[in-house]
């Protein structure tokens, strides 16, 4: 039995009637950019996450970029972030002319290690940019304390973690700004690119709305050089269909993850969910010293799987030579991680097929 890592057609079949109706509603309206659907989605997402303001943008990368733009970063100023994540996190820092500084991760959570962040802080540091990797919140209590002590801005990269929480407080409401991606593979997903920035600062929200729309807050009046980065009405309408179901969708992911962990914990290192954390398993990522051989075995048997991330950002050509501390855990994780199929519409038979195929290797 072939098992796909992600099955978007199956998901569309589940929501088809609602999505088709939503798309038809937008097409009939004749309004496709910054209309009612975007405005409503911004309010609904902000309310869900516990923030005051949401600003829809064209992608998760733009969410990161524009959030950092509000800080008016200067050349030479530094932002601390993990190297073990998607390159967009570092790109957003570079877009602003600032310097990304890479800190190492906790080997058990794969998220930033607060101790390594503290070691990386210099007089040039302006912000900390943790990633809630694979759907597990970063250690925000420790990072918040550190940011407050050092007078730093804390920006969440929550692209992979919609609906995750820490001590009943949702990601998206754990820092000064939070950035989401609605890329088709994400837990709350559009059918194209899309993103959003959340903040509880009216001043920052107003600046974001200006930046996303050519530096304009009033038609034909531009106060700064901005960008063309607007979430479109079609994507917002599709996201509004799925948002009321996100807790159920995440619960389905968690059920699959729990089945995997029970069956596989004796043969591989399974994902950790520390006490007080609510993991939403954007990816179900195991670790094993036999990663490459297991990857080949699974693919030969028709099991969809991927390595996130085989080459850390600091080893990628554009970011070689940037300042960083020792990144031993980052480099080790890149050689050992493997993500198994995970989505809300996996059947029990498919889950069992994945489990048995992994066990058969060992």
Image (cartoon, rainbow, N blue to C red):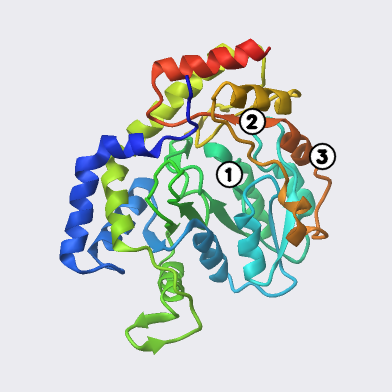
Residue 205 lies, in percent from the top left, at 42, 67
Question: Mark 2 Cα within 10 Å, few/some/many (few <14, many 20+)?
Answer: many
First reached walking from the N terminus: tag 1 or tag 3: 1
- The residue labelled by disc 1 is 140
- What residue do we see at 77% from left, 37% from top? 329
CB atoms of marks 1 and 3 within 8 Å:
no
Determine which residue is flagged by label 3: 328
Q: Residue 236 versus residue 196: which sits nearer the camera?
A: 236
How many C-alpha atoms fall within 10 Å of the one at disc 1: few (<14), some, or many (≥20)? Answer: many
Residue 13 is left or right of residue 292, and the answer is left
- Which numbered mark, 1 or 2, is in the foreground of this view? 2
Determine the image quadrant of residue 195: bottom left
Left or right of 355: which side holds 39?
Answer: left
The quadrant the C terminus occupies is top right
- Secondary-structure class at tag 1: helix
The residue furthest bottom is 221
| Mark found first going from the N terminus, 2 or 3 | 3
Q: Which label is found at residue 338?
A: 2
Residue 115 point in image, percent of width and height? 74, 43
Tell me if label 1 and label 2 are in contact, CB under 8 Å. no
Image point (69%, 69%), residue name: 98
Q: Is residue 232 above or below residue 189?
A: below
């Amino acid at each position: 039995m072939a098992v796909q890592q992600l099955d978007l057609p199956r998901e569309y079949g589940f929501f088809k009637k609602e999505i088709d109706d939503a798309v038809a509603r937008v097409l009939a309206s004749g309004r496709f950019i910054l209309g009612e659907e975007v405005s409503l989605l911004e309010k609904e997402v902000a309310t869900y996450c516990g923030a005051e303001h949401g600003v829809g943008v064209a992608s998760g990368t733009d969410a990161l970029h524009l959030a950092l733009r509000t800080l008016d970063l200067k050349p030479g100023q530094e932002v601390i972030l993990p190297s073990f994540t998607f390159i967009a996190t570092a790109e957003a820092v570079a877009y602003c002319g600032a310097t990304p500084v890479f800190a190492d991760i906790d080997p058990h959570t794969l998220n930033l290690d607060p101790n390594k962040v503290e070691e990386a802080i210099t007089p040039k540091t302006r912000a900390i940019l943790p990633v809630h990797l694979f759907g597990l919140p970063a250690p925000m209590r420790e990072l918040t304390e550190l940011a407050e002590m050092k007078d730093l801005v804390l920006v969440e990269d929550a692209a992979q973690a919609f609906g995750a929480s820490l001590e009943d407080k949702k990601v998206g409401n754990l820092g000064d700004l939070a950035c989401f991606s609605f890329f088709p593979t994400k837990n709350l997903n559009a059918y194209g690119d899309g993103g959003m920035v959340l903040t509880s600062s009216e001043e920052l929200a107003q600046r974001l709305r200006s930046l996303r729309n050519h530096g304009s807050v009033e038609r034909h009046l531009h106060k700064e050089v901005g960008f063309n980065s607007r979430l479109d009405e079609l994507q917002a309408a599709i996201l509004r269909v799925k948002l009321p179901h996100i807790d159920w969708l995440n619960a389905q992911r968690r059920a699959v993850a729990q089945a995997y962990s029970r069956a596989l914990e004796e043969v591989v290192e399974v994902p950790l969910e520390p006490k007080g954390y609510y993991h939403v398993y954007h990816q179900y990522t195991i670790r094993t010293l036999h990663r490459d051989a297991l990857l080949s075995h699974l693919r030969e048997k028709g099991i969809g799987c991927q390595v996130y991330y085989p080459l850390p950002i600091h080893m990628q050509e554009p970011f070689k030579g940037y300042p960083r501390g020792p990144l031993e855990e980052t480099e080790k994780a890149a050689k050992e991680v493997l993500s198994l199929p995970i989505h809300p519409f996996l059947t029990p038979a498919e889950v069992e097929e994945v489990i048995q195929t992994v066990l058969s290797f060992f």
